[in-house]
Image (cartoon, grey):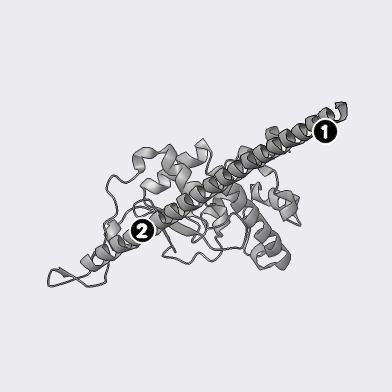
Amino acid sequence: MSQSNISVNENGWIKWYCNLEDHHFFCEIDEFFIADQFNLYGLKQLFDHFEEALQMILSPNTPTDEDLEDDQFLELYNEASELYGLLHARFIITPQGLTLMKSKYLQGRFGVCPRVLCERQNVLPIGLSHDLRTSRVKIFCPRCQDVYSPKKQMSDVDGSFFGSVFPHIFLSVFSELNPTQPANEFVSKIFGFKVHKKKGSKFQIQQNQTEMYYYAEDHIKRLSQIQTSQQQQQSQQQQQQFSHKNDEEAEKKQKEALNAIQKLSKQKQKK
């Protein structure tokens, strides 16, 4: 499919799909991006009706109510929506896609972090896997660096439609959007005193220090064991060298004794 045969239509399938209920996380993929064979690499073998699904995505027409009641059409629609989602995950990490997602992020279209102490920090969509039908889309908070389920279920929005790398690439490109303040931590208190064995309490701090101490002690024991084994190896090598020298000296003395005996025997024969 050549790019010259494509006509951009403002009211086509892509705009209709992105405007569906619970599809506000999606941005509209440029049709030229979809038509580029390089961007389609590795996707054809995932679908039984790849060409038909691709034609549906690029169609200038939107489905009618009758189409949505047709089982064959719905089967093709499911493939088209999954194909669009996988292309979407590739598109949103391009400069054009990142710009479109930035606009949505600044408008708060992805929602805010459900964690109270993040103070309504804007979030980004994320998938826990790049594979289809593994998990639904989740949201990533740049402040607490954690992942949550979105407020709405979005049952037909797969996590692979966004991928697991999008938020990190987004915040690397737009570094000015990284939160300047770290996430606040909640500390359990009763009448102003930190609760025993709870997060931030003195007990926990001492426990962490004790664990570190025992770790250091264990580390020292291992070092001493290694040092002892090295010393034993050195002593064994020295003993071997010493015994080897003794053997050489013994052989030398034996040779000298044999030579002396031979000389005496020769002298006796001459006499």
Q: Quadrant of the N terminus?
A: top right
Q: Is residue 183 above or below residue 65?
A: above
Percent of width and height locating residue 225: 46, 55
Q: Does residue 140 show up? A: yes
Looking at numbered disc 2 in the image, what kind of residue is underneath it?
Glu
Looking at numbered disc 1 in the image, what kind of residue is underneath it?
Ser
SS at mark 2 in the image: helix
Picture disc at residue 214: none
Q: Quadrant of the C terminus?
A: top right
Picture disc at residue 265: 1
Residue bearing the label numbered 2? 217
Q: Is residue 169 left or right of residue 262?
A: left
Which is nearer the eye, 21 or 177? Answer: 177
Q: Does residue 34 show up? A: no
Please name the residue shown 79% across and 32% down the image.
264
Percent of width and height locating residue 192: 13, 69
10 Å crowding of disc 1: few (<14), some (14-19), many (20+)? few
SS at mark 1 in the image: helix
Q: Is residue 116 above or below residue 190?
A: above
